[in-house]
Amino acid sequence: MKKNKPISIILLLFNIICTAQQVPGKEENIPYLVTFSKDSEKRWGDDDFSQTWFYVIPKDTKKPFYIRVYDPDVAGKIDELKADANSKTKFSVFGGKGCYTDPDATNKDPLGNYKSGTLLNSKVFGNQPEFDEKWFNFGPFNPTEGELINELNGYVFKIISDGLEGNDGNLYKYFLSSSSISNIPLEGANLFTYEYTFRVDEKPGSISHVYPFVDENVISVNINTFDLDDDSYMRLVSVAKKGDKINGSIDNEWAISNHTISNEEKKTSLDIQIIKFREKVNNNLVLTITNQYGKSLPFFSIPIGGVPKYKYKIGIK
């Protein structure tokens, strides 16, 4: 499996002023992230019971910040409970040298030294009603506690959710905030992941969106889906694609869909759309995307350059 290295093109991305740092992002129409505990069946929609998100704090940020987790416990009406809410989830925040640059850190699978860097804080949540539908704060953290990546023009941190014992699904959200009591975004920050595990919107006719970024070296991509099920279909929209069909996976299986990347699409975001066509609850999905060399590409909570719109071509005779 190919390892990832910091992407130099991302330097231009973080010069964009972002208006929010919520995961899932508002533009995505995704209700929650999902992490199941390790005794769960993979057919419930989580292939490896772990999820890693990176966040970049601009170099000139001086004030401390918080990573906030909404509904971190594994109980209550939001989570996917299988029996008696017997599960636990561990959230861990890392910074320091190797947090991002260790090759295992950006591997889409939780293998090797994926917990690289310096552990700054962690907490295990179980069946704890006091955290149900509430925000929990990790922090405050100083920006310089992260790993300085000049190519990204900022300090990189990561938060990892690991499903421990139990067989329930933990549904939650993140927000990167300058406040411990409310969600106040940090100017210029953004969050990204290389493997996205989330709950699909349950309303028939709804469209969920995921926004990978392709740099100037990408000539084709493989979109990998796990456990899409039979209540949704997928399509790819970009500045050059009106709505190409994506091969969706069946229950407890991976599917690969290959798509060429035109010159117009380089240095832009793609829009992977999941369209719900019939009612079904508890549909969770895993997505990864790789380039022609098998290298994973990042999904951003805020689409870089904005939501991509298909550009109609008008021929001139």
Image: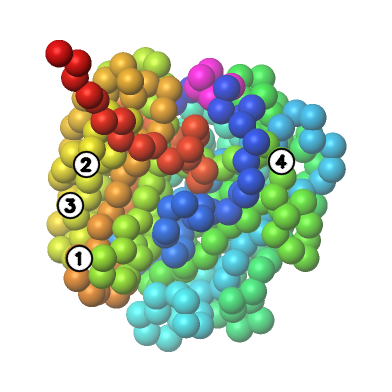
In magenta, the rendered stretch is 6-11
Disc number placed over residue 187 in the picture, else none: 4
Question: Is 94 included in the stretch rendered in magenta?
Answer: no
> Horizontal and vertical percent for residue 19?
64, 46
Horizontal side, residue 298 vs residue 242: left or right: right
Q: Magenta span: helix, strand or loop, mainly?
A: loop
Residue contact at pointers 3 and 4, CB within 8 angstroms = no
**First in sequence: mark 1 or mark 2?**
2
Is 105 situated above or below 277? above
CA distance for labels 3 and 4:
38 Å
Name the element at disc 2: loop
* Amino acid marked by disc 4: Glu
Instruction: Please identify the quarter of the rendering in which residue 157 is found.
Output: top right
Q: Indicate which label's residue lies in the foreground, 2 or 4.
A: 2
CA distance for labels 2 and 3:
18 Å
Residue at numbered disc 3: 249
Name the element at disc 1: loop
Residue at numbered disc 2: 243
**First in sequence: mark 2 or mark 4?**
4
* Amino acid marked by disc 1: Phe
> Horizontal and vertical percent for residue 46?
34, 58
